[in-house]
Amino acid sequence: MKRLVVVGNGMAACRLLEELTRLAPDLYQITVVGDEPFAGYNRVMLSPLLGGGTDEKTITTHPHQWYRDRNIRLITGTPVVAIHRRRRQVETAAGHLLDYDRLLLATGAAPRQLPVEGVTLDGVVSFRDLYDVRRLLSLPAARVVVVGGGFLGLEAADALVKQGHDVTLVHSRGHLLNQQLDESAGHRLQQDLEARGLKFVMQARTQSIEDNGQGAVAAVHLADGQRLPADYVVQAVGIVPRAELAASAGLTVNQGVRVDDTLQTFDPAIYAIGECVEHRERTFGLVAPLYEQASVCASHLAELGHRRYLYADSATRLKISGIDLVSCGDFLGDRGKGTEQGETLQLNLPGSYRRVQIRDNRVVGMVLYGDVSDAPFFEKLWKEKTDIGALREALLLGEVFCKRPGDSDEHSEEVAA
Ligand SMILES: Cc1cc2nc3c(=O)[nH]c(=O)nc-3n(C[C@H](O)[C@H](O)[C@H](O)COP(=O)(O)OP(=O)(O)OC[C@H]3O[C@@H](n4cnc5c(N)ncnc54)[C@H](O)[C@@H]3O)c2cc1C
């Protein structure tokens, strides 16, 4: 039997293991090394966990028994610290030496640290793993400043409000989720979150974190001179691929571990998937593309390899209960500058906002806020590049109004699926 060693036991690795053990159950003796001390869990569900909407058992997707059932050796709580490529061996901090024929790197990403004085003070927390959530859940009622108005920051802030904390979110831009929403939707989102008790400071740059004299957080200072008193600071300002291990082994690393369309690195015995990789100059931060990478990579490891990984844009959704929004594609119509900019269709109703961006009679992006029941319809038009010429008048009203006489129900079910 060949030996496969997997470094990292996160979402991409677990998905790959599922596919590989299904495609080729007897091809490899598999060892997985994860530096977190847990079996496989769903990182996406850390937000509901922090908000009190689920528990650790429920978000454990791959308990220890799952690995045992597939004869996978799982080593947890220790990182791989070196890859000896010449002798095809990896070394863990705990002293294991593991031989491999194939090696898979799935080391994920680390939270980006705020580049400011005071970031190492006690009370500055990230929101990345179960440890962080346990820590945040153990806080006494406190003043918390969350830095970053992207998905992660918003989900953390909303969950912390639910936990009874006094939360202020600081964002550097003029509206929330500026990478996924236009200004109108961003402002609606802010108003809805303010109604839940969340406070915002917009267009604000964090300058430093003040020490309370005992090595812990006292306040956050902003570039415009404001001082926000705080007991804790949650930093949610992006992620950085964890590629140090690969770099130290001499693999090609730019922003992440460079892979080709088969997810192979510079060394043909070593593959990489997930947030640690860079594929065609792109890095990743959502599960949809890395599940596809896992599937393609599994087919190659199973020696059935004929598939190539190509990035496909997907829609994004916020996981804050009671706030529904979906965004996809070129929702501002400003990508590919210099070409035809296209046209914006907007519907602005109490409780529902829709923006659909059209170019050359095709939907190139959209934002739905409030009523998102038509999201699958717009997503399908967007993905399939459907000519919407005949639907234009009724498009914003949604699927029901776009049905033409003779359209079958079968079609609409397909759209809604
Ligand atoms: C709170 C939160 C909410 C999210 N919500 C969404 C969402 O709604 N939708 C969405 O699409 N995405 C979401 N994401 C992003 C999603 O979770 C990530 O894209 C996904 O987990 C990345 O998978 P990965 O396997 O590449 O990395 P990870 O899941 O981070 O797994 C990597 C693992 O490798 C381990 N590791 C690193 N180096 C070593 C080493 N040297 N030795 C051994 N082990 C090592 C790490 O500790 C980690 O356990 C969310 C993320 C967070 C934190």
Image (spheres, helix red, strand yellow):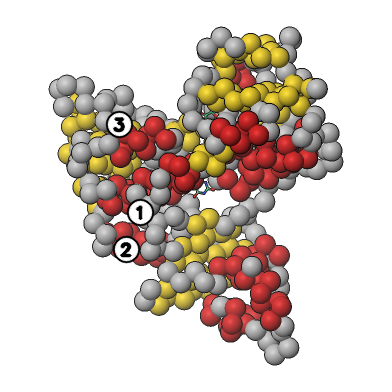
Q: How far apart are the alpha carbons under marks 1 and 3? A: 24 Å
Q: Residue at x 25, y 37 (%)?
A: 139
Quarter of the image holding residue 68?
A: top right
Q: Is mark 3 within 8 Å of ligand 1?
A: no
Dot 1 falls on a residue whose secondary structure is loop
Mark number displayed over residue 369: none
Disc nearest the viewer among 2 and 1: 2
Q: Is residue 354 visible?
A: yes
Q: Is residue 323 left or right of residue 245?
A: left
Q: How far apart are the alpha carbons under marks 3 and 2? A: 27 Å
Q: Can you identify the residue that label 3 sits on?
A: 124
Q: Are marks 3 and 2 in contact (CB under 8 Å)?
A: no
Q: Position of residue 99 (x, y in %)?
A: 71, 14
Quarter of the image holding residue 64?
A: top right
Screen quadrant of the N terminus:
top right
Q: How far apart are the alpha carbons under marks 2 and 1? A: 16 Å
Q: Can you identify the residue that label 2 sits on?
A: 192
Q: Is residue 18 above or below residue 367?
A: above
Of the image marks 1 and 3, the number of the one nearer the N terminus: 3
Say what amino acid the circle numbered 3 marks. Val
Residue lying furthest left: 213
Disc nearest the viewer among 1 and 3: 3
Screen quadrant of the C terminus:
bottom right
Say what amino acid the circle numbered 2 marks. Asp
Q: Position of residue 344 (x, y in %)?
A: 54, 70
Q: Can you identify the residue that label 1 sits on?
A: 174
Q: Is residue 16 above or below residue 191?
A: above
Dot 3 falls on a residue whose secondary structure is strand
